[in-house]
Image (spheres, grey):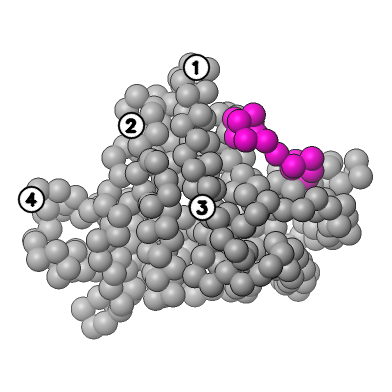
Amino acid sequence: MKIGRSECIGTDRRTGAGIAATAAREALKVAPRKVDYLGGGSFGRAFGVSFDGGEIVVKLLADSAMMRKETHDLGLLGSACPLPVPKVLFCRESDESVPVACYGMERIDGKSALTSLSLQLGSKAKKKRFADEVTTALHAIHGVTADKYGDTMSPKYGDWHDFYRPFAESVLTSAKQDRIFDRAIIDAMSAAMDVYDIIFAEKASAPCLIHGDLNVANIMVDKKGSVSGFIDPLNSMYADREYDLFQFRNLWGERFKLVDSYVSKYGASEMMEYKLAFYGLWNEAWCSIKVGYVIQPIMKPLVKSIKALCAKL
Protein backbone atom coordinates (compact mmCIF):
# COMPACT_ATOMS: atom_id res chain seq x y z
CA MET A 1 0.00 0.00 0.00
CA LYS A 2 1.58 3.23 -1.16
CA ILE A 3 1.91 6.03 1.36
CA GLY A 4 1.59 9.69 0.46
CA ARG A 5 -0.80 11.98 -1.38
CA SER A 6 -2.65 10.33 -4.23
CA GLU A 7 -3.98 12.00 -7.32
CA CYS A 8 -7.68 12.65 -6.82
CA ILE A 9 -10.18 12.22 -9.60
CA GLY A 10 -10.86 15.62 -11.14
CA THR A 11 -14.15 14.74 -12.78
CA ASP A 12 -17.30 16.39 -11.46
CA ARG A 13 -20.68 14.65 -11.41
CA ARG A 14 -22.07 16.21 -14.57
CA THR A 15 -18.96 15.57 -16.63
CA GLY A 16 -18.66 12.11 -15.11
CA ALA A 17 -22.19 11.20 -16.14
CA GLY A 18 -21.35 11.99 -19.75
CA ILE A 19 -18.15 9.96 -19.59
CA ALA A 20 -19.98 7.00 -18.03
CA ALA A 21 -22.63 7.12 -20.76
CA THR A 22 -19.98 7.18 -23.48
CA ALA A 23 -18.04 4.27 -21.98
CA ALA A 24 -21.19 2.16 -21.58
CA ARG A 25 -22.43 2.93 -25.08
CA GLU A 26 -19.12 2.04 -26.71
CA ALA A 27 -18.62 -1.15 -24.66
CA LEU A 28 -22.16 -2.54 -24.77
CA LYS A 29 -23.24 -1.14 -28.15
CA VAL A 30 -26.48 0.20 -26.68
CA ALA A 31 -27.78 3.72 -26.14
CA PRO A 32 -28.15 4.72 -22.47
CA ARG A 33 -31.57 6.06 -21.42
CA LYS A 34 -30.54 7.56 -18.11
CA VAL A 35 -27.43 8.11 -15.99
CA ASP A 36 -27.61 8.57 -12.21
CA TYR A 37 -24.81 9.51 -9.83
CA LEU A 38 -24.53 6.76 -7.19
CA GLY A 39 -21.70 8.07 -5.03
CA GLY A 40 -17.97 8.30 -4.74
CA GLY A 41 -15.01 9.76 -2.95
CA SER A 42 -11.66 11.35 -3.64
CA PHE A 43 -10.51 8.70 -6.09
CA GLY A 44 -13.61 7.46 -7.86
CA ARG A 45 -17.16 8.19 -9.00
CA ALA A 46 -19.87 5.57 -9.59
CA PHE A 47 -22.78 6.06 -11.99
CA GLY A 48 -25.83 3.92 -12.70
CA VAL A 49 -26.35 3.67 -16.46
CA SER A 50 -29.83 2.50 -17.52
CA PHE A 51 -30.72 1.25 -20.98
CA ASP A 52 -33.53 -0.79 -22.49
CA GLY A 53 -33.27 -4.17 -20.86
CA GLY A 54 -31.17 -3.40 -17.83
CA GLU A 55 -28.81 -1.25 -15.81
CA ILE A 56 -25.10 -1.37 -15.03
CA VAL A 57 -22.69 0.59 -12.87
CA VAL A 58 -19.79 2.47 -14.43
CA LYS A 59 -17.01 3.47 -12.06
CA LEU A 60 -14.57 6.22 -13.01
CA LEU A 61 -11.18 6.16 -11.28
CA ALA A 62 -8.24 8.47 -10.81
CA ASP A 63 -5.78 6.16 -12.58
CA SER A 64 -5.46 2.94 -14.54
CA ALA A 65 -3.63 1.08 -11.77
CA MET A 66 -6.68 1.46 -9.52
CA MET A 67 -8.91 0.16 -12.30
CA ARG A 68 -6.75 -2.92 -12.86
CA LYS A 69 -6.52 -3.63 -9.14
CA GLU A 70 -10.26 -3.26 -8.42
CA THR A 71 -11.38 -5.37 -11.35
CA HIS A 72 -8.87 -8.09 -10.47
CA ASP A 73 -10.08 -8.18 -6.87
CA LEU A 74 -13.77 -8.20 -7.80
CA GLY A 75 -13.10 -11.34 -9.81
CA LEU A 76 -11.33 -13.02 -6.91
CA LEU A 77 -13.99 -12.08 -4.39
CA GLY A 78 -16.80 -13.05 -6.72
CA SER A 79 -15.40 -16.55 -7.15
CA ALA A 80 -15.17 -17.05 -3.36
CA CYS A 81 -18.21 -15.28 -1.94
CA PRO A 82 -21.56 -17.08 -1.63
CA LEU A 83 -23.30 -13.69 -1.90
CA PRO A 84 -23.30 -11.62 -5.12
CA VAL A 85 -20.24 -9.49 -5.89
CA PRO A 86 -20.43 -7.26 -8.99
CA LYS A 87 -19.24 -9.04 -12.14
CA VAL A 88 -16.95 -6.89 -14.27
CA LEU A 89 -18.37 -6.35 -17.76
CA PHE A 90 -15.68 -4.20 -19.35
CA CYS A 91 -12.52 -2.22 -18.54
CA ARG A 92 -11.45 0.94 -20.28
CA GLU A 93 -8.19 2.84 -20.27
CA SER A 94 -8.44 6.60 -20.71
CA ASP A 95 -8.36 8.12 -24.19
CA GLU A 96 -9.78 11.12 -26.04
CA SER A 97 -13.43 10.10 -25.73
CA VAL A 98 -13.15 8.66 -22.21
CA PRO A 99 -10.54 10.82 -20.40
CA VAL A 100 -10.38 8.73 -17.20
CA ALA A 101 -9.87 5.03 -16.54
CA CYS A 102 -13.13 3.23 -15.86
CA TYR A 103 -14.89 -0.09 -15.80
CA GLY A 104 -18.44 -1.35 -16.02
CA MET A 105 -20.00 -3.94 -13.71
CA GLU A 106 -23.27 -5.54 -12.79
CA ARG A 107 -25.45 -3.59 -10.40
CA ILE A 108 -26.24 -5.33 -7.12
CA ASP A 109 -29.90 -4.99 -6.17
CA GLY A 110 -30.90 -3.06 -3.07
CA LYS A 111 -29.34 -0.23 -1.11
CA SER A 112 -26.40 0.19 1.24
CA ALA A 113 -26.91 -1.13 4.76
CA LEU A 114 -25.67 2.30 5.87
CA THR A 115 -28.88 3.92 4.62
CA SER A 116 -31.42 1.10 4.99
CA LEU A 117 -34.11 2.26 7.43
CA SER A 118 -35.68 -1.18 7.32
CA LEU A 119 -32.48 -2.59 8.73
CA GLN A 120 -31.57 0.29 11.03
CA LEU A 121 -35.01 0.27 12.67
CA GLY A 122 -35.42 -3.48 12.54
CA SER A 123 -35.71 -5.91 15.44
CA LYS A 124 -32.80 -7.51 17.27
CA ALA A 125 -33.58 -10.73 15.43
CA LYS A 126 -33.36 -8.94 12.07
CA LYS A 127 -30.02 -7.36 12.96
CA LYS A 128 -28.72 -10.71 14.18
CA ARG A 129 -29.75 -12.39 10.93
CA PHE A 130 -28.01 -9.63 8.97
CA ALA A 131 -24.81 -10.10 10.99
CA ASP A 132 -24.95 -13.86 10.47
CA GLU A 133 -25.37 -13.50 6.70
CA VAL A 134 -22.48 -11.02 6.47
CA THR A 135 -20.03 -12.96 8.62
CA THR A 136 -20.81 -16.32 7.05
CA ALA A 137 -20.10 -14.89 3.59
CA LEU A 138 -16.94 -13.14 4.77
CA HIS A 139 -15.65 -16.35 6.31
CA ALA A 140 -16.10 -18.05 2.94
CA ILE A 141 -13.90 -15.37 1.39
CA HIS A 142 -11.33 -15.97 4.13
CA GLY A 143 -11.32 -19.61 3.10
CA VAL A 144 -9.29 -18.63 0.04
CA THR A 145 -5.65 -18.88 1.10
CA ALA A 146 -2.22 -18.29 -0.43
CA ASP A 147 1.38 -19.22 0.31
CA LYS A 148 2.43 -15.60 0.85
CA TYR A 149 1.05 -12.38 2.34
CA GLY A 150 0.63 -9.17 0.41
CA ASP A 151 -1.30 -7.63 -2.46
CA THR A 152 -3.54 -10.03 -4.35
CA MET A 153 -1.70 -9.30 -7.57
CA SER A 154 1.75 -10.06 -6.16
CA PRO A 155 1.85 -11.63 -2.66
CA LYS A 156 5.48 -12.13 -1.68
CA TYR A 157 5.90 -11.97 2.11
CA GLY A 158 6.51 -15.11 4.14
CA ASP A 159 5.42 -13.45 7.38
CA TRP A 160 2.53 -11.02 7.88
CA HIS A 161 4.68 -8.59 9.83
CA ASP A 162 7.34 -8.50 7.13
CA PHE A 163 4.59 -6.78 5.16
CA TYR A 164 2.58 -4.94 7.80
CA ARG A 165 5.17 -3.59 10.24
CA PRO A 166 7.14 -1.58 7.64
CA PHE A 167 3.81 -0.19 6.44
CA ALA A 168 2.81 0.79 9.99
CA GLU A 169 6.18 2.43 10.65
CA SER A 170 6.00 4.36 7.38
CA VAL A 171 2.50 5.62 8.12
CA LEU A 172 3.62 6.90 11.53
CA THR A 173 6.69 8.58 10.04
CA SER A 174 4.56 10.25 7.36
CA ALA A 175 1.95 11.31 9.91
CA LYS A 176 4.59 13.02 12.06
CA GLN A 177 5.66 15.04 9.03
CA ASP A 178 2.15 15.90 7.84
CA ARG A 179 0.54 19.02 9.29
CA ILE A 180 -2.97 17.62 8.99
CA PHE A 181 -2.48 15.55 12.18
CA ASP A 182 -2.79 17.10 15.61
CA ARG A 183 -0.63 16.17 18.61
CA ALA A 184 -3.28 13.88 20.13
CA ILE A 185 -3.27 11.64 17.06
CA ILE A 186 0.52 11.48 16.86
CA ASP A 187 0.87 10.75 20.57
CA ALA A 188 -1.68 7.95 20.39
CA MET A 189 -0.02 6.39 17.35
CA SER A 190 3.45 6.67 18.93
CA ALA A 191 2.22 4.99 22.14
CA ALA A 192 0.67 2.16 20.14
CA MET A 193 3.81 1.63 18.08
CA ASP A 194 5.83 1.40 21.30
CA VAL A 195 3.83 -1.71 22.27
CA TYR A 196 3.59 -3.19 18.75
CA ASP A 197 5.45 -6.33 19.78
CA ILE A 198 3.01 -6.94 22.63
CA ILE A 199 -0.11 -6.34 20.53
CA PHE A 200 1.13 -8.59 17.75
CA ALA A 201 2.92 -11.23 19.82
CA GLU A 202 0.69 -14.02 18.52
CA LYS A 203 1.33 -15.53 15.12
CA ALA A 204 -1.03 -14.17 12.46
CA SER A 205 -3.48 -16.41 10.68
CA ALA A 206 -2.42 -18.08 7.45
CA PRO A 207 -2.54 -15.71 4.45
CA CYS A 208 -6.19 -15.45 3.46
CA LEU A 209 -8.12 -13.34 0.98
CA ILE A 210 -9.74 -10.25 2.51
CA HIS A 211 -12.22 -7.75 1.12
CA GLY A 212 -10.37 -4.85 2.75
CA ASP A 213 -13.25 -2.39 3.21
CA LEU A 214 -16.29 -4.35 4.34
CA ASN A 215 -18.04 -1.71 6.40
CA VAL A 216 -21.83 -1.28 6.35
CA ALA A 217 -21.61 1.22 3.46
CA ASN A 218 -20.33 -1.57 1.20
CA ILE A 219 -22.89 -4.19 2.19
CA MET A 220 -26.05 -4.13 0.07
CA VAL A 221 -29.43 -5.18 1.44
CA ASP A 222 -32.88 -5.71 -0.06
CA LYS A 223 -36.14 -4.14 1.11
CA LYS A 224 -36.49 -6.74 3.86
CA GLY A 225 -32.99 -6.11 5.19
CA SER A 226 -31.47 -9.33 3.87
CA VAL A 227 -27.97 -9.08 2.41
CA SER A 228 -28.00 -8.85 -1.38
CA GLY A 229 -24.26 -8.51 -1.99
CA PHE A 230 -20.87 -6.97 -1.23
CA ILE A 231 -19.39 -4.09 -3.22
CA ASP A 232 -16.31 -1.82 -3.40
CA PRO A 233 -13.28 -3.77 -2.15
CA LEU A 234 -10.27 -1.65 -1.19
CA ASN A 235 -6.74 -2.98 -0.88
CA SER A 236 -7.85 -6.58 -1.01
CA MET A 237 -4.89 -8.76 -0.12
CA TYR A 238 -3.76 -12.01 1.40
CA ALA A 239 -3.54 -11.00 5.02
CA ASP A 240 -4.16 -11.79 8.65
CA ARG A 241 -7.91 -12.47 8.60
CA GLU A 242 -8.47 -10.09 11.54
CA TYR A 243 -7.30 -7.25 9.33
CA ASP A 244 -10.71 -7.59 7.66
CA LEU A 245 -12.66 -7.11 10.89
CA PHE A 246 -11.86 -3.55 12.02
CA GLN A 247 -14.10 -2.17 9.26
CA PHE A 248 -17.07 -3.82 10.97
CA ARG A 249 -16.80 -1.09 13.61
CA ASN A 250 -16.66 1.82 11.18
CA LEU A 251 -19.66 4.11 10.70
CA TRP A 252 -22.43 2.42 12.74
CA GLY A 253 -21.45 -1.19 12.19
CA GLU A 254 -21.39 -1.75 15.94
CA ARG A 255 -25.20 -1.64 15.94
CA PHE A 256 -25.16 -5.07 14.33
CA LYS A 257 -22.43 -6.65 16.49
CA LEU A 258 -20.66 -7.89 13.37
CA VAL A 259 -17.35 -8.55 15.13
CA ASP A 260 -19.14 -10.48 17.87
CA SER A 261 -20.95 -12.56 15.27
CA TYR A 262 -17.73 -13.43 13.45
CA VAL A 263 -15.80 -14.25 16.62
CA SER A 264 -18.58 -16.38 18.11
CA LYS A 265 -18.55 -18.61 15.04
CA TYR A 266 -14.93 -18.62 13.97
CA GLY A 267 -12.85 -17.58 16.98
CA ALA A 268 -10.27 -14.86 17.48
CA SER A 269 -6.75 -14.27 18.71
CA GLU A 270 -6.19 -13.34 22.36
CA MET A 271 -5.18 -9.78 21.41
CA MET A 272 -7.88 -9.23 18.81
CA GLU A 273 -9.32 -6.09 20.43
CA TYR A 274 -5.89 -4.47 20.50
CA LYS A 275 -5.18 -5.53 16.92
CA LEU A 276 -8.46 -4.15 15.61
CA ALA A 277 -7.86 -0.85 17.38
CA PHE A 278 -4.38 -0.64 15.88
CA TYR A 279 -5.49 -1.66 12.39
CA GLY A 280 -8.39 0.79 12.47
CA LEU A 281 -6.31 3.78 13.54
CA TRP A 282 -3.54 3.08 11.06
CA ASN A 283 -5.97 2.60 8.20
CA GLU A 284 -7.64 5.91 8.94
CA ALA A 285 -4.27 7.68 9.20
CA TRP A 286 -3.20 6.14 5.87
CA CYS A 287 -6.44 7.29 4.22
CA SER A 288 -5.99 10.78 5.69
CA ILE A 289 -2.48 11.03 4.27
CA LYS A 290 -3.73 9.96 0.84
CA VAL A 291 -6.51 12.56 0.66
CA GLY A 292 -4.82 15.35 2.62
CA TYR A 293 -7.30 15.85 5.44
CA VAL A 294 -8.54 14.16 8.64
CA ILE A 295 -12.19 13.22 9.17
CA GLN A 296 -12.37 13.94 12.90
CA PRO A 297 -15.68 12.15 13.65
CA ILE A 298 -14.04 8.94 12.45
CA MET A 299 -10.55 9.62 13.78
CA LYS A 300 -11.40 10.70 17.33
CA PRO A 301 -13.05 7.43 18.47
CA LEU A 302 -10.11 5.47 17.05
CA VAL A 303 -7.63 7.60 18.99
CA LYS A 304 -9.69 7.26 22.16
CA SER A 305 -9.88 3.47 21.77
CA ILE A 306 -6.17 2.89 21.20
CA LYS A 307 -5.25 5.16 24.13
CA ALA A 308 -7.52 3.27 26.50
CA LEU A 309 -6.22 -0.10 25.37
CA CYS A 310 -2.54 0.91 25.47
CA ALA A 311 -3.05 2.11 29.05
CA LYS A 312 -3.91 -1.46 30.01
CA LEU A 313 -0.63 -2.92 28.73
Contact (Cβ within 8 Å) of mark 1 with mark 3: no
Amino acid at pointer 4: Asp
Q: Is residue 186 magenta?
A: no
Q: Position of residue 78 (x, y in %)?
A: 38, 52
Give the mark nearer the N terminus: 4 vs 3.
4
Q: Nearer the viewer, residue 147 or 313?
A: 147
Mark 1 or mark 3, earlier in chain: 1
Residues under labels 1 and 3: Cα distance?
30 Å
Label 4 to label 3, Cα distance in Å?
38 Å
User: How far apart, in angstroms, are the residues tagged by discs 4 and 2?
Assistant: 23 Å
User: Which residue is labeled 4 in the image?
Assistant: 52
**Tag 3: amino acid:** Val
Q: Is residue 167 above or below residue 199?
A: below
Residue at image mark 3: 144
Q: Amino acid at mark 2?
A: Asp
In this picture, which residue range is highlighted in magenta? 260-274
